Image (cartoon, rainbow, N blue to C red):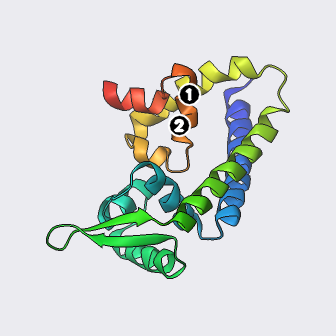
Amino acid sequence: MHESRLANLLGAAVLNLSDRMTAAAAGAAGVSLSGTAALVVLTEFPGLGGTELGRRIGIGQPACARMLDQLEARGLVRRQAKTGRAVAVVLTRAGREAAARALEARQEVLLAALRTMPDRAALEPLLEQLLRGLHAEVRSGDLMCRLCDRPGCVAHQQTCPVGQAGRES
């Protein structure tokens, strides 16, 4: 197989899955894609400030502040004063429920895609290797995993390949 064809096949598959996964997650959460990513990240890391949250989901501080205004207006997050000007962002119950719906919708899209492959077990080590390689280039596991089901990734005493790559770098 020619590498250019393999690269093209990978690109088409990744783009299609990304489009379907993000649309399903954002639709289930009922907010924008960046808002959905914020809800998912805050599920695992409650109390992040706006600047750090924006960094983890790939948007700047001004855009993050506007997004948080929208999420707060919808009752999905709450800002809590920390020290000085620092503000911690936490999910409300409605925010936790929206994040759970987003992760479930994401999972359904990905599981449906996997069911089309007869040899799924062979894919796991290849994806782990790919993710470690991508982390070496991107060097931002937080950004790579902004829509990940983090507990699902490490279930059954498995190691997250992105987290492992981050610890090794």
In this rendering, position of residue 51 left or right of residue 15: left
Residue with the mark numbered 2: 151
Q: Secondary structure at mark 1?
A: helix
How many numbered marks appear?
2
| Percent position of residue 167, x then y | 32, 28
- Horizontal and vertical percent position of residue 136: 40, 32
Q: Amino acid at mark 2?
A: Pro
Q: Position of residue 135 (x, y in %)?
A: 43, 35
> Would residue 60 be found to the left or right of residue 39 on screen?
left
The amino acid pointed to by label 1 is Ala
Q: Nearer the viewer, residue 112 or 82?
A: 82
Residue 120 in view, yes or no: yes
Please give the name of the residue rendered at 63% of the width and 50% of the height, measured from the top-left corner.
103
Question: 136 or 31, which is in the foreground?
Answer: 31
Residue found at x 57% / y 42%: 149
Disc 2 crowd rating (10 Å Cα; few below 14, some 14-19, many 20+) is: few
Up-down: is 129 above or below 15?
Answer: above
Query: Quick one: 164 or 169, which is closer to the camera?
Result: 164
Residue found at x 59% / y 70%: 32
Asked if labels 2 and 1 touch by Cβ distance under 8 angstroms, the answer is yes
Quadrant in the picture for the N terminus: top right
Q: Residues within 10 Å of mark 1 (few under 14, many from 20)?
A: few
Q: Which mark is residue 105?
A: none
Q: Which type of secondary structure does the marked residue at label 2 adopt?
A: helix
Drawn side of residue 60 relative to residue 43, left or right: left
Residue under label 1, please give it. Answer: 155
